[in-house]
Amino acid sequence: MNNLLKIVFSLSISGSILILTLFLFKPLLKTKISKRWQYYIWLVVIARLTLPLSPEASPVGSMVRNINYKVVQTFIQPDVKENTNQLYQTEIQKNVAEINFTPKFNTLTPADQNYGSILSIITENLWLIWLTGVLVLLTRKITTYQGFVRYIKTRCKEVSDVALLDLLASAGERIGVKKPVELYINPLTSSPLLIGFFHPCVVLPTTELSELDLQYTFIHEPTHYKHLDIFYKWLVQVTICLHWFNPLIYFMGREINHACELACDEAVIKDLDMESRRAYGDTLIHAIGAGGNYNGSLASVTLNESKELLKERLESIMYYKKASKIMIGMALILTMAFCIGATVSGAYTVPGKNPASDIVSPTSENNDIPRQSFIDTDSSRTVSLSANYCGIEIAKTDGEQVTFEFLGIDNPSLFKTKCEVVNGILKICVDGTAARDAADNSSKHYYVENGPNYVNVVRIGIPDKKYSAFSISLDGVPAVLPDLNAPVSIECVEGSVSLTDTEIYQGTYNIKNSSGSISIAADTISSNITVDSHGECELTFNQMPQNLYLDVSGSQGQVIIPDGWSRTQSMGNAAPIIRLSNHGFTRVTIKK
């Protein structure tokens, strides 16, 4: 799944939690907290839905990462089981100790081979479906608004009655609106409304209203402009477009529209006595059916939103009470608690790229690190590794702890390491940024392994167990990996990945590389491997494979394959499945 879509999905989950929370507590707060608070508290939800900010470790971020592991297992990295011809049915097992990755393969039909490829393409391109929905919905809303504006402008008649204009100007001064507000008549509009982002216009269905109704209308509509409600409504519409797949977003939009009118009513009546409030309520009733049947668009703000809302607005007007100091204090406490909850819920962040990522980042506390660090491991855990600007070599160990060894490193204090268990995930982080910055600019090999002699390489010893999954993020890192006995997802930027075990027979591999190189060499390969790279990719068989389905049809650069092979080569049981989608140089060789 694309990282952008993971971020949007996680934001939608966090936002949904907040939406459900507000709906749950609405009956308790409806008559106790001000309508203005009930209106603007939704800005916290919108911020959570649109801003990909998250603490280092968050529940939603971890949940999305775990979901991604299952998606990778189910759709990208297939397992063919005994006595079945179906691909892509494997999920990460809850009891890892019972997993047996040594399958017996049956012959696959061409339909079976294409099935996995189709699912892989769909999974990797879900973001296109999401983006298409965003663009279609946003375009529809913009064109609807433009059509509405054209309708208003072509059928409006400017009001020239000096008495009405003076009444409107007086109302604007009373509520503190300094910008001139224009006045028009359009008999086809269903009720008075306000349009215009920077040049506000009040549109009346008729001027045949009582002076009192006009007075309250001229206070109500500019109040919307003063509160920037038109901008607020468009912010809500953009948020709906971004999360069009989430049904709760539409409930949120409707609730904010209702809260907008209630908050505006509250602002109008806050200094009125009971008799004046009753007169204002009569104005709302008179607004129903005052004009035609053309309803205001999403970009306008109306005096009468709907008949369904009228009863609630009238009740709020008649039973209005100024908030006490206790309720103001409660509102502040609730706001702080809601903001904290919105922050803690978090979101998915790209490993190794965002300081707020749930991949553990090293801190200055790691400067004086020993040559070995330890932490107990659990075989059922997912392992998350992030490495920046140093050589990485992962080695399996017989111990029960993670170890760090510094090879060819003159100053270990320049390398930061961190290892801890967060939310059940074993998170390992290594950072050689300080060593890179301190290196001689004339040397470009300050973190490269050179044959048997190491230069700035951190060897990470991991207990030889069957973990549930590995997530590895590499930035400017040459990494040498063994067969990790688990589903492995690798994202690499400006680095290289080498798989060196002579037998790659357990787990599955999904490797993405924006630049650099991918090197896979083994006597036998029984693991399914998917590579999406923009650099060099080399696959070497130390001996002729007996069973294989190799697909390099997605590679767009130069491709060199053994003589007689096609870009979709099938041999024996047509398993394992190895797909190389490379935009650079691709070479497949057989030594023997």
Image: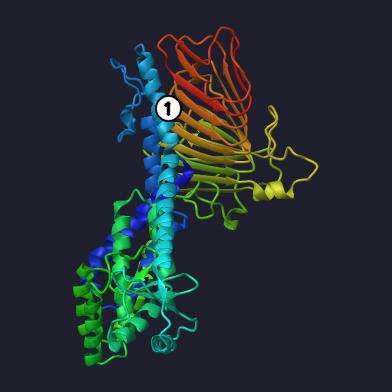
Which residue: 39% across, 79% down?
Answer: 223
Is any atom of residue 486 visible in this view? no
From the image, which quarter does the C terminus lie in? top right
Q: Position of residue 521 (x, y in %)?
A: 57, 20
Q: What is the three-letter code of the residue carrying label 1?
A: Gly
Is any atom of residue 43 visible in this view? yes
Q: Residues within 10 Å of mark 1 (few under 14, many from 20)?
A: many
Q: Position of residue 584 (x, y in %)?
A: 62, 28
- Tell me where residue 191 sits by quadrant: bottom left
Residue 54 against residue 483 in the figure, above or below: below
Question: Label 1: which residue?
Answer: 507
Residue 105 against residue 313 in the figure, above or below: above
Which residue: 57% across, 45% down?
Answer: 430
Q: Position of residue 391 (x, y in %)?
A: 63, 37
Which residue: 65% across, 48% down?
Answer: 433
Residue 302 against residue 406 in the figure, above or below: below
User: Horizontal placement of 186 versus 562: left or right?
Assistant: left
Q: Position of residue 248 (x, y in %)?
A: 29, 55
Front in this rendered view, residue 231 or 155? 155
From the image, which quarter does the N terminus lie in? top left
**Number of marks in the rendered image:** 1
Front in this rendered view, residue 130 or 207? 207
Front in this rendered view, residue 476 or 445? 476
Mark 1, secondary structure of its residue? loop
